[in-house]
Amino acid sequence: MRDLPLIVGYALAGALAAAVPGAVLLRALRRHSVTVHIFVLLAATVAAALASVLAVARAMFISPHDLQVLLLVLAVSAVVSLAIGWWSGRRMARDAMWADQVRQRERQVEAGRRELVAWVSHDLRTPLAGLRAMAEALEDGVVADPATVQEYHGRLRVETDRMAHLVDDLFELSRINADALDLTLSAVPLRDLVSDAIASAAPVAAVHGVRVVAAESGWPTVTGSEPELGRVVANLLRNAIHYTPHDGTVVISAGRDQDTAWLAVADGCGGIPEADLPRVFDVAFRGEPARSPRNAGPPAPVATSNANGGGGGLGLAIVRGLVEAQGGRVDVTNSGAGCRFVIRIPAG
């Protein structure tokens, strides 16, 4: 027991000789990763233990054989400890990065939700105010001549259709976000899909004075869900028509690259600022003022004014969700006098 204070002193001196430089190194590496911090911390701890044992062993005059055995045991323990520390550090770093990404994603989703509520509230407020004003005018007899009454009825129908379209978009987006899509994959000929979309969008294109041109050949068959793919093509086509100036042209083409088929819709919108390109498919992003319509033609008649848009900025967000749900992707680039949207999905 008489040697106990001396042993403690030697052990403390050896431990401090290794621990102090380790603490200084940790401070110098404070901007590095969690893995590096944990590894350096364990290395300093192991070094402090080794230094303490060596100091005490030399003071106690342990035989060379016993000292060699002791150092061998400590070395094996050190290697195992450092290996476990490195593995644990990398795992903790991955978990920390994953948790940070989840938090960022949650913040983005919450910000998108607030922005969507604001956009939808704005888009509903305007048609609802118009519906109420026209309904009160009809109810109070403010308008009585048949022509004006018919015009009001047409406006009521148009605004009702607009709100119904917005509600449908919201429902579809909620299904996408909840991963509740019921997809039935089959072989889908893109030529037939595009022909139906062009026929459906013909009245809108006529109102805007826009020509829709489809390639004569090169139409592949893809593997996908026909209703969802039809909505994707319809959304892209109507979006292109909406932002193409009067007397402009929208071009639809398709092709195949090995196991992937692609379909492209090129408009004449004038292009999107490069900084806004990554946000084009975000919910409620409308690209203002980058993609504000510049239609120089006559205003649309009342009965077809819904073609001008008025949606909640959900069309392209729905396109991305539906394409990704079928194992594909969608991209947009500036090309020529406008933008080129390209969807890529598995070929049939």
Image (cartoon, rainbow, N blue to C red):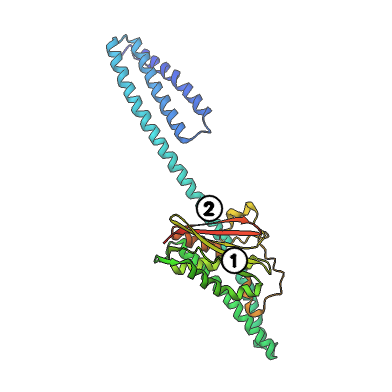
Quarter occupied by the C terminus:
bottom left
For the residues bearing labels 2 and 1, Cβ distance under 8 angstroms: no
Q: Earlier in the sequence, mark 2 or mark 1?
A: 2
Residue located 59% across and 74% down the image? 202
**Residue that appears at 35% across and 14% down:** 56
Reply above or below: 108 against 217: above
Under mark 1, the amino acid is Asn
As rendered, which of 165 and 138 lies closer to the eye?
165
At mark 2, the secondary structure is helix
Which x, y percent locates residue 160?
A: 58, 78
Residue nearer the viewer, 347 or 64: 347
User: On residue 239, which mark appears?
Assistant: 1
Can you say which quadrant of the picture contains the N terminus? top left
Q: Position of residue 173 (x, y in %)?
A: 50, 64
Graded by Cα atoms within 10 Å as few (under 14), some (14 to 19) or many (20 or more), the crowding at tag 1 reads: some
Front residue of 247 and 45: 247
Whether residue 314 can be seen here = no
Q: Which mark is residue 107?
A: 2
Residue 271 lies left or right of residue 81; in this view the side is: right
Quadrant position of residue 310: bottom right
